[in-house]
Structures are given as structure tokens and as C-alpha cells.
Image (cartoon, rainbow, N blue to C red):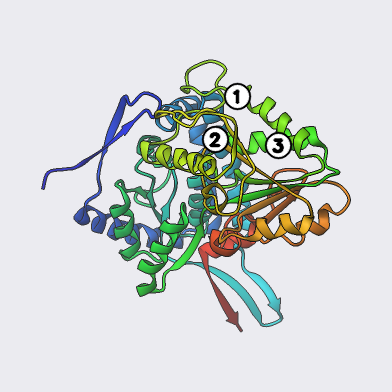
Amino acid sequence: MMNRKLQSFDPSNGKLLGEVSVTGPEALEQVIANAKTAGQYWRRLRPQARLDLVKAAFTHLEPHIQELGLLLSQEMGKDLRRSVSEVGGSVYSAGFVAEQAFESLQSKKVSSNTELQYQPLGVAAVISPWNYPVAMACNLIVPALIAGNSVVFKPSEETPLIAHAFCELLNEILPDDVLQIVHGDGETGKALVESAVDLVAFTGSMAAGKDIMSRASGGLKRLIMELGGNDPMIVMKDANIEAAAYFAVGSSLENTGQMCTSTERIYVDEAIAEEFENRVVQIASEFRAGAWNESNVQIGPVINKKQHRKIMTHIRDAVDQGAQLRLGELHQSPPFIRPTVLTDIRPQMLVEKEETFGPVIAISRFSKPEEAINRANNSVYGLGAVVFGEAGAQAVADQLEAGMVAINQGVGGSGESPWVGAKQSGYGYHGSPAGHQQFAQIRVLSH
């Protein structure tokens, strides 16, 4: 059979960057077999030895941060500063995450004759997205390895080159086949989920997550899934308007809005709405869309034509149903979408009901906090939510149905807190000591 190739393009100009071989059925079967063999060696290593090897592998990446950042920019489209920051942040934080996972997976005495042990599950399939192709992969790969699992990594078909380079460098230090990479589109991902893996750790869309759950059900495979979001922001009448407006713009437009915790829906008290909306338009109008290697660019290209079409459909649907287009255009050709501000958003509009995942700031007014709370919670998603205000902000935050809620700042918490979604935004969670333990089988030993 002819070896199929997966090509990767610069989304800002369509230039071919390179290609990788697609992992076919026979090759995938061999990868899984190799992972099982390597996993037997890896799980028998002392936990400290595993920790030392993982930390050494990421230390090995440090001289390559700039070149990896450049490749990430070319392949995904974000500007070089953000790409280098993503790679560097991932590389330098990996040691902390590895240490934290190591500590959280130590056996624990719970009584005089009982202890809890954390055993490897076996082969972990890690499936990661294109919007943060290094950071999201590291969040799952590091604890999976520290727990003693071998890992088969399937990156997005949109960003195969950066993932491949990242893995090749790690594998110059890690033992053979402890970390392997497979390439392809959704069909490869489905085959991986249905293969003889023991755990699927996934970050991506809700639809893909539901498909994974269905395919993994036959083997009752362990699942850790961070899915989509449709994050609301509530701006109360006593909020600091300047701070709220800057956050609204920054959160909605960061990474071209291609971020799971981007602010997607903003509800502002009618008492301050006009001033807030005007300030948002002023700030957003200073953002410029362009290629990753252009100067003074804050908004990169949309990842592909399909996503571009979806975002523009959401914008036009809102305007057709009565929303005001305060900034932006109704007709824009791929790959760029300039910053867009929509006001007078209503519950039936696509920008409120669905995850837009683009550089769109969607604003609606409310007269009573209860109205904003109800609309914020009227979603199948529940990843993050933000409240800006003083008196009563905590009471409003307490009523929001989200895994992560923040007051006068972005979500995420500290390094000790998990990255977790409520409702259909997540199944299990990762990050934090408790999150790392999900990559292992807990065993109760009585003696």
C-alpha cells in the first residue's frame, strides 16, 4: 500500500510547510504492540528514575525553544512572541508538573494496615488540539509518563510538524517507544481510541469527545477529556469599566479567539452598558489582523476555511436577527477575520448558543443580575465563567454553572488547582495533584 502523506500548510498564506506519513492500520497495530512492550519496562522503573528521565527530556528541549516556536507560528499562525512563550512555558513548567505528579502518585498510608497505591494503567492515548499544540500535549503527556504509562500521541492534523519535532527531541532522551507519535485525521484518532489502549486523554471539541466516549465504551477505557466552552462574562454595575473592557477584549480575541476559555458571551448591566460597549469598541479597534511574521499584529489567521466559514456564519446570523455590528465586517475572505464587536445579542442567536471560537466580542444588556445568571447558565457547556464587579459579585459567581469561575480576573487558579469543566465541557479533569491521579489505577493494599 502506498504510504499516504499528511501535508501541513501555513494558514496565513497557504504555503506548504512539510508533510508527515499517515499512520495506517498495520502501522498503528505495531505502535500499540511496541507501546505495550516498552510499557512493561517503563512501569518497572523506580518512580524516581521515571521522573529523572522525563525532566531530562524536557531540559533537552531548552536550546530548541526558539526554533520550535518558529515552527509553531508557521504551522498554527499565532505570532512568534506567543509561540515562543507557549513552547518555553511548556518546557520550563514540565519539571514542576512532573514533580507535582510524582508527589501525588506516591503510596499513602491511610491507616495502620492500609495504604493507597497508584499503579500504571498501561498504554495512554493522548489526543491533542491545534490551538495550543505544545502546551495542551504537555498537560497530558507529562502526568501520563510519570504515572508509569507508555504514551501514544496523536496530534491534530492541522499541526503535525510541531508535534513531530517536539516528540523527536524528547525521544532523544526517553527510552525507546515509551512515547510514540501517530499521524492522521479523525479516522486515525478513531482507530487509536478503538485500539488496545487503556486510557484516552483528550482535549478538543464536545462532538469529538462524545464520539470518543462511544468508541471507548466497549472496553470501558478510562477517559480524561477537556471539551469545548462557551464562557460567559457578567459585568455588574459597580464593576471597574476600564478593567472589565480590557479583559473582555483580551479574553475574546486572544489567540484569534481560538481558545477554550475565550470569553464568548458578555452580559453587562444596562446602567453602565453604553460606556462599557463604547470602550470595548475603542480597545478592539486597535487590534490588527495579519500573518504571524507581520509587525504589530495581535490577531492571526483562522486555522482553516471551515472554521472561518463557521465564524462568519455566526456573525451574519446575529446581524440578521437584529444584533448591532459595532466593529467588523459581514463579508471577509479567509484566512483573516478582523476584530468584531456585536451588541444586542439575544438567546436564539448562534453566537450565544454555540461556541464561535473566533475573534468575536458578543455583548448583551441585562436589567437584573438574575437575568444574566440565567442566560449564562443556559448552555450545555460549563468550562469557565467570569464576573466583574464588587458588591454581590461573589453571590453571582456562586450561582454560575462552570468548572472554573473567577472574579475580576481570568479563570485557571493556581498550579495546585485542576483544569476542569462542568456539564458537557469535561469528563474527568487534569492538572493538580488530584488530576494527575486520574492517569493511574488506584489500588488499596491491606496488610
Which kind of residue does numbered mark 3 sit on?
A: Phe
Q: Residue at x 44, y 46 (%)?
A: 129
Q: Which of 294 and 286 lies nearest the eye of the viewer?
A: 286
Residue 133 appears in the figure: no
Q: Which residue is mark 2?
A: 359
Q: What's the CA distance linking mark 1 and mark 3? A: 14 Å
Please give the label number shown on residue 247.
3
Q: Residue furthest top?
A: 295
- Label 1: state its secondary structure: loop
Does label 1 or label 3 sit earlier along the sequence? 3
Q: Residues within 10 Å of mark 1 (few under 14, many from 20)?
A: some
* In this picture, residue 264 sits left or right of residue 222: right
Q: Which residue is mark 1?
A: 287
Q: Residue furthest left?
A: 1
Q: Residues within 10 Å of mark 2 (few under 14, many from 20)?
A: many
Residue 118 spot, x, y in % from top left: 55, 68
Q: Residue at x 73, y 29 (%)?
A: 279
- Label 2: state its secondary structure: loop
Q: What's the CA distance linking mark 1 and mark 2? A: 10 Å
Is the residue 310 above or below the residue 64 in the image?
below
Q: What's the CA distance linking mark 3 and mark 2? A: 14 Å
Q: Which of 304 and 182 lies nearest the eye of the viewer?
A: 304
